[in-house]
Amino acid sequence: MKKILLIEDDVFLGDVLLEKLKKENYEARLSRDGKEGFELIKEFKPDLLLLDIILPGMNGYEILEAKQKDPKIKDIPVIIISNSGQPVEINRALTLGVKDYFIKAQFDPEEVMIKVRTFLKNGNGSEDDSLTVEKVPPVLRGKKIMAVEDDNFLSDIIVRKLSSEECVFTRAEDAEKALSLLENNIPDLILLDILLPGMNGFKLLERIKSDDRLKDIPVILLSNLGQEIDIEQGKKLGAKRFLVKASLTLDEVIDQIKQVLAGVKKV
């Protein structure tokens, strides 16, 4: 049975998540105090930590920093659940080894559960993620990645993840901006959202695949849409992968990019 520790002082959210975790047969525990929660990490040694940032006693960053200094718990994976989504705070969390980052105002508890299930499906997240990456050559260094995504928060997290891989990252907020950039800049891969202002991602993909200059660029669709009809449409239009945002961790998105660029066929 996988163990999950939740450190969250919001009474309603903490209780809801704890109940959902227990219903799915996780061994889950909850702490509403940062200092108490940090001691519980050492005692409970969870497989995954769900951590708030603003906490009494000891805040989330202090917990992450102290955790990094303790070799017995430093490798326990962490997903942040916070009221704040400022880029500087997200970047600080990522440098401290956080695997994913939720903004409370932008999710419902079921989205957290999807991430938890996905992250723990093959056992300990940090261990399995490293094994997955090792199977794929380090192909991102120097590669040009374009993200067509109007979500500033998601784009900011992705660019920080990709920056550590030494690739060249460009972003377009909509299809028209993407087409403008593509006139003079041919990327090695395009990460494409479907729900965009103006022309949607499917229309843009169709334009890309009908252009002889651009048709060979591999495209990964990354969307909140996950209906079978959407997935089939993406395949018919030539997308290499169709990824549903809520069902993948950021590490898995980066791994999918690596696999496509390495020419790994989807199983």
Image (tube, rainbow, N blue to C red):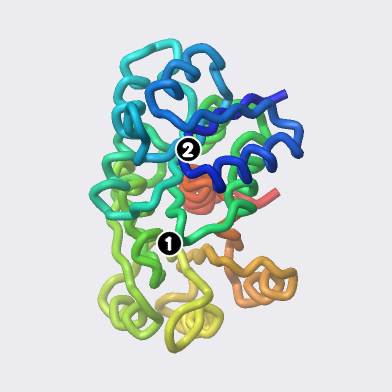
Q: Position of residue 195 (x, y in %)?
A: 51, 77
| Callout 1 crowding tier (Cα within 10 Å): few <14, some 14–19, many ≥20 | many
- For discs 2 and 1, the disc positioned in front in the rendered view: 2
Q: Is residue 60 left or right of residue 15?
A: left
Which residue is located at x 45 percent, y 45 percent?
Answer: 81
Q: Is residue 20 above or below residue 105?
A: above
Image quadrant containing the N terminus:
top right
Identity of the amino acid at label 1?
A: Leu
Lower position in the chain sequence, tag 2 or tag 1: 2
Q: Is residue 102 left or right of residue 58?
A: right
Where is mark 2, residue-wise? 8
Looking at the rendering, which quadrant does residue 33 occupy? top left
Q: Is residue 204 above or below residue 166?
A: below
Residue at mark 2 to residue at mark 1: CA–CA distance:
38 Å
Which residue is located at x 34 percent, y 52 percent?
Answer: 84
Q: Position of residue 190 (x, y in %)?
A: 43, 65
Mark 2 element type: loop
| Callout 2 crowding tier (Cα within 10 Å): few <14, some 14–19, many ≥20 | many
The circle drawn on residue 189 is 1
Observer-nearest of 194 and 204: 194
Identity of the amino acid at label 2?
A: Glu
Looking at the rendering, which quadrant does residue 54 occupy? top left
In the displayed orientation, state which residue is furthest to the bottom: 198
The circle drawn on residue 108 is none
Whether residue 25 is visible to the viewer of this picture, yes or no, is yes
Q: Is residue 111 above or below residue 218?
A: above
Mark 1 element type: strand
Looking at the rendering, which quadrant does residue 118 occupy? top right
Whether residue 137 is visible to the viewer of this picture, yes or no, is no
Which residue is located at x 40 percent, y 81 percent?
Answer: 175
Q: Is residue 102 left or right of residue 62?
A: right
